[in-house]
Amino acid sequence: MTRRGGQDRDRSAERSRPPPRTGRRSPSASCGRTVAIALGLGVALAGCSLSGPFFDDSYEKTAVLSPEPVPAYRKLVAEAMKQASTPIDAAGLAIAEPRWIERIGGPAWIVCLRSDPEARHAVYYAFFILKEKVIDWRTAIGTDRCVHQDFVPFNTAAVPADDKPKAEPAAARSRP
């Protein structure tokens, strides 16, 4: 005869216990941890990438003083377009005022050019000017901030030879 409370309960408890652990984890537990770590790192790194000039208003508030006078940028850009190995269609162009920037190749004036007046399928170009000479130009990239500029129509044929700006751009005058 077995006792009702003790031994029968011990035997039923032994049958329902999981087998002893051998030190190996199940694949699903390991995979879950890996996914959780990857998601955590992804969120942390995404937060870091969302800061900077694209989401920061301080870029617009910091104006850099230029050691150079404002160049005759319309004339210089028109000449550079004529000498370019890759032609830029002169129809419907718009140009922005020059801005003094710090860049990897050294400080320079940047002038942005937009190809489509309605900006639906616009291609933006960045021209870099230093000492009254275009030192570099390219299709604009995000850090050039050309899409955020104010543009006016630009007719390359009507650019006068002595195209000196009448006033300095706001960015070159003073720091806020």
Image (cartoon, rainbow, N blue to C red):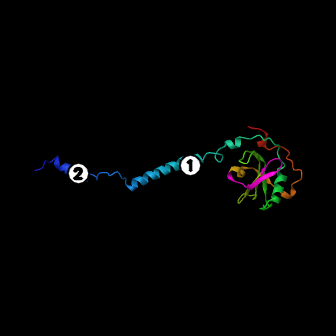
Q: Position of residue 171 (x, y in %)?
A: 76, 43
Instruction: Determine whether, in the image, residue 78 is placed left or right of residue 101.
Output: right
Instruction: Report the amino acid beneath label 2.
Output: Glu
Instruction: Determine whether, in the image, residue 17 is placed left or right of residue 99.
Output: left
Q: Residue furthest right?
A: 161
Q: Position of residue 36 (x, y in %)?
A: 46, 50
Q: Is residue 169 visible?
A: yes
Q: Residues within 10 Å of mark 2 (few under 14, many from 20)?
A: few
Mark number, residue 106: none
User: What is the secondary structure assignment of the residue under circle 1?
Assistant: helix
Q: Which residue is mark 1?
A: 46
Q: Is residue 29 above or below residue 56?
A: below
Q: Which residue is mark 2?
A: 14
User: What is the secondary structure assignment of the residue under circle 2?
Assistant: helix
Q: Position of residue 104 (x, y in %)?
A: 71, 47
Q: Is residue 22 magenta?
A: no
Q: Looking at the rendering, which quadrant does residue 114 occupy?
A: bottom right
Q: Is residue 91 above or below residue 56?
A: below
Q: Position of residue 113 (x, y in %)?
A: 76, 54
Q: Which residues are magenta?
A: 128-142
Instruction: Report the amino acid beneath label 1.
Output: Ala
